[in-house]
Each structure stands twice: as C-alpha cells, then as structure tokens.
Image (spheres, rainbow, N blue to C red):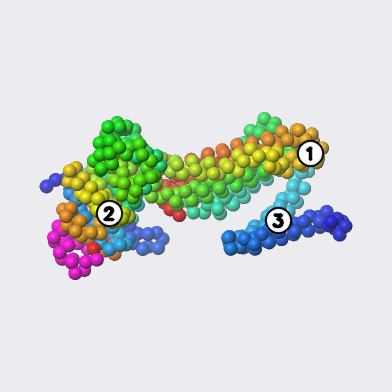
C-alpha cells in the first residue's frame, strides 16, 4: 500500500522499519509488567541494530566490487563484534570477551574455512559474507545462551559444586553436570531449526535463492547446508568454551570464584 | 604430646576490593582425636574459618599447616580428601545414595564394595538405603548421607559446619546424637561449628570463641563457657 506514496525503494524500506519497530514497542508496552527492563533495552537495541545493518549494507555495496579476500576482514570484524556482545551477556564470568572471541573464532572460523575449502560455500563475497554472517550470528547467540545458562547453573548449585570440591573432586568434575546442562540448552535452537526445517519455517536464504532464480529443490538443499553449518559452528564454539570456562569460574586452587 | 595435626597460624581473610575482613589473626592447633568446638554469634566468621581450613576460600593472611606442612604446598583435591567437610545443608548429588557415598573414593580412582557401602550406611542408621534416589530423602536422612559421604573418604580431620542447623527439631536431635556417637566410636578429629554451648560442653575437648571475625577465647569448655555465661550469645 505504501508503493503509491513512496516511489523510492529506500524510503519505503524506512517506513517498513518504522512500522515493525513500532509493533515491537507495542508488544513490550503490553508486556511491560513481565519484563520492565525491556522497555529501555529493546528500543536501544533496535536503534543500534538499524544503524549497524544500514552501515553493513553500505559497506557491502562497496565490497561487492572488490576481491574475495577482503571478506576475511569483514568476517573477522563480525567475530570481534559478536565476542563483544557475548561478553556483555556474560560479564560476571572473568575474561568473558577473550573466551567468547576464542570460542566463536574457533567455531565459526574453522567451520567457514572448511566449508569454503571444500567448495560448499563459494569463494565469493556475495555468498561468503551473508552465509558467514549467519553462521557467526547464530554462533554468537548460542555462546550467549551457553555462558548465561552455565553461570545460572553455577549460581543455583553453589552448594553442590563446593560439596564436590570438598570431597576432593577436580574443578572439571565438580562443574561437569552444569556444563552439560548449559551445552544442551544452548544448542536447542540450532537443533530445532534443523528439525523444523520446511515444516515450521522456510528461512530467508531459501526464499532469496528461489526469488533470484535458483531451483527450489537446490535452494532447499542449500538451506539444509546452511543450518547444519550453523549447528557445527555453534556446537564447536560451545565445545571450545566448555573447556575454557571452568578455569574462569573455579580458581587454580579449586575454589569457586563465580557465585552469582 | 602428640604432633599437631592441623594448625592455623594468624589465619585471616579480607574481602577484595572492599577491604572488609571476615576473619583476622586466628591461631590454634588441633591434635589427632581432639574435638574443637567453634562457637560464636551468627556472622562471627565461624563458617569462614572452616572454609579457610578446607581451602574452599583462600586466606589473605596467615596459613594452615597440616602435619606441619603449609597446606598451600598440597594439591587442593589431595588436601580435601584428608580434611573432610559436612556443610549446613546436605547438597546430595543426583543419583542413588550409593553414588553419593562412592563419590569421594571414586575421585582418586578407588571403588567401594557394596558391602562397604552397606556397612557405612548401617553405621548411620540407613540400612537398605543404598539404591534409593538421593533427592527423595528427608532433610535428616539427607544429612546422614552427607556425613557418610564425608566419612567414606576416611578423612583425618572432619569439619562440621553447623550440620544440624537446617534441620527440624526431631531430625536435629537424632543427627546430633549420631555425630556424637561417630566421633566417640571413630575417635574423629573434628572442628565443629555449633550454636549449642551444651553440645560444645558435652563433646568438645576445647572450645574456640569467635566474635566479629576475631578469636576471643580458647580453652577447655569449662574455662571458656563458664566465663562467658553472662555474655552468652554463644
């Protein structure tokens, strides 16, 4: 309906953004008693998100004319930003930024390298950056859930962990059960995405490929490739983080240093 | 005189970065088979003292000597196998009672025969409990399992951090009687944090009074407790 009022595509896009942002504010106002903090957090997150995505759009427009290797810097920047966002969610864990950077770098980085070397992801900016960003963003979400859940498990089981330590358990043994719970919880969205593929949702990349002329069957298979790549990256990042995080919550003297 | 088993020298802990001290300048020694009752008002630093002896918290001043050796030279897991601790609540692990009992020995690669587990459980009045789910027990039963779990490690020193304070009246009495019996029969060396002067008088060879993070008195129960009757919020 806005096409008759806004012939410019960018202006139409801005109006659509305003409508969806207004809808989120409405929903938060409706649920403000359940989550009062969201009233401040979500508008700021939306403002930040729109500025970032517009900036990325502008950068992409410039990069698309450049050589493929330049995408390495863009993806590295995304990993740094993702680690910084995870760090804010897990600030009670000492050294969370370095931990998230190593985990996301190892998870997303190695999976993207393997997929590119084997040709699964074409070595073109046009595919590397969008697919890479999906992999990094989902790995970031998984890391946030993993670290937040792990910290929550620690806070809820201080007595059990210290009882285990007091019985002579190593830090790894004392927190093993809570690492498993966090690992399992953090991968639920990635597993559910694969499980519900095509039934509950048809993700954007598949729709985009169909719209741009690819065969719907190939687009469907490629969507599976993307989601399984996301799962591998997320799981690998959590695996790496699970080996690094114990030393950050239990000291070298086997004392629990993160309690809340 | 027997060798001192555990010796605290000028032990203290200060919170960083506030600088608030939880405990300061605590010095005493315990010989094998001795029961030292630690008394004092809530928040005095009694639990902090036991946590420092078990090295669950790091001392910011002083240290603890175990068999004359600075305990910082020992690996924390090795230290805690010989300095057992029973906390205010049982904090049993998910699984069976037997899983909980064998937890400590399993950490050093040892197994326990079913008969050994049964014998330990019989000692605390929990015959035929080995295969029961640990998370379905009453508070008193759970604390009995926690005591058995600590004893399964065969510690040289047992730290009891008010192990009956979270129990109801009926369970409290029976668990206290159990502890008194175990200490007598096994000749356990204990540091026992208690709110009860009667218990301290009945069980302890010596009493340590801690107030506001400092040791206020140390001596036999009669010496310490009779003198403190008037000030007696111990």
In primary-sequence order, the first of circles 1 and 3 is 3
Q: Name the residue under label 2.
A: B170
Residue occupying image coordinates x 75% and y 59%: A19
| Mark 3 and mark 2 residues within 8 Å of each other at the beta carbon | no
Q: Mark 3 points at which residue?
A: A50
Left or right: B64 as drawn, with respect to B221: right
Q: How crowded is mark 2: few (under 14 residues within 10 Å), some or many (20 or more)?
A: few
Left or right: A210 as drawn, with respect to B196: right
Disc 3 is placed on an element classified as helix
The vertical placement of A17 against A185, above or below, is below
In this orientation, which residue lies closer to the viewer: B110 or B213? B110
Frontmost of labels 2 and 1 is: 2
Q: Residue A250 carries which label?
A: none
Residue occupying image coordinates x 65% and y 63%: A29
Disc 2 is placed on an element classified as helix
Frontmost of labels 1 and 3 is: 1
- Quadrant in which the N terminus of chain A appears: bottom right
* Residue A187 position in % (x across, y down): 57, 41
In this orientation, which residue lies closer to the viewer: A197 or A206? A197
Q: CA gap, disc 1 to disc 3?
A: 26 Å
* Residue A259 position in % (x across, y down): 43, 53
Chain holding disc 1: A
Q: Residues within 10 Å of mark 3 (few under 14, many from 20)?
A: some
* Residue A116 position in % (x across, y down): 67, 34
Residue occupying image coordinates x 61% and y 63%: A32
Disc 1 is placed on an element classified as helix
Q: CA gap, disc 2 to disc 1?
A: 73 Å
Could you tell me if residue B19 is visible in this image?
Answer: yes
Q: Mark 1 points at which residue?
A: A210
């Amino acid at each position: 309906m806005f096409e008759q009022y806004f012939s410019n595509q960018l202006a139409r896009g801005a109006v659509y953004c305003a409508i969806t942002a207004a809808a989120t504010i409405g929903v938060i106002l409706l649920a403000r008693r359940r989550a009062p903090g969201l009233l401040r957090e979500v508008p700021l997150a939306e403002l930040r998100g729109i500025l970032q995505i517009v900036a990325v759009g502008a950068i992409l427009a410039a990069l698309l004319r450049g050589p493929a290797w330049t995408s390495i810097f863009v993806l590295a920047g995304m990993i740094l930003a993702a680690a910084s966002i995870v760090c804010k969610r897990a600030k009670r864990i000492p050294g969370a930024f370095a931990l998230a950077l190593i985990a996301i770098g190892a998870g997303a980085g190695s999976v993207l390298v393997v997929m590119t070397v084997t040709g699964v992801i074409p070595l073109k900016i046009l595919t590397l950056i969008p697919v890479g960003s999906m992999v990094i963003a989902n790995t970031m979400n998984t890391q946030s859930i993993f670290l937040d859940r792990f910290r929550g498990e620690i806070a809820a089981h201080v007595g059990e962990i210290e009882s285990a330590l007091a019985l002579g358990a190593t830090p790894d043994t004392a927190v093993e059960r809570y690492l498993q719970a966090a690992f399992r919880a953090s991968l639920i969205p990635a597993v559910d995405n694969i499980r519900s593929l095509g039934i509950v949702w048809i993700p954007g990349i598949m729709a985009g490929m169909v719209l741009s002329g690819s065969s719907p069957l190939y687009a469907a298979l490629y969507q599976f490739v993307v989601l399984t790549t996301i799962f591998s990256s997320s799981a690998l990042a959590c695996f790496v983080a699970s080996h690094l995080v114990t030393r950050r919550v239990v000291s070298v003297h086997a004392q629990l240093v993160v309690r809340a | 005189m027997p060798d001192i088993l555990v010796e605290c020298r000028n032990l203290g802990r200060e919170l960083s970065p506030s600088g608030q001290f939880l405990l300061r300048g605590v010095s005493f020694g315990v010989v094998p088979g001795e029961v030292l009752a630690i008394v004092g008002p809530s928040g005095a630093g009694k639990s902090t003292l036991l946590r420092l002896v078990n090295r669950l918290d790091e001392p910011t001043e002083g240290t603890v000597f175990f068999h004359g050796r600075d305990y910082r030279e020992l690996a924390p897991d090795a230290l805690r196998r010989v300095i057992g601790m029973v906390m205010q609540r049982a904090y049993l692990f998910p699984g069976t009672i037997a899983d909980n009992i064998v937890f400590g020995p399993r950490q050093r690669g040892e197994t326990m025969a079913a008969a050994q587990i049964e014998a330990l459980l019989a000692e605390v009045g929990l015959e035929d409990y080995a295969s029961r789910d640990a998370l379905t027990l009453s508070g008193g039963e759970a604390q009995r399992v926690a005591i058995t779990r600590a004893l399964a490690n065969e510690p040289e020193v047992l730290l009891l951090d008010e192990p009956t304070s979270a129990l109801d009246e009926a369970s409290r009495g029976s668990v206290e009687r159990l502890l008194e019996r175990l200490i007598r029969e096994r000749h356990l060396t204990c540091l026992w944090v208690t709110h009860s002067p009667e218990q301290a008088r009945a069980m302890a060879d010596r009493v340590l009074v801690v107030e506001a993070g400092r040791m206020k008195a140390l001596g036999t129960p009669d010496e310490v407790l009779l003198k403190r009757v008037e000030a007696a919020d111990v």
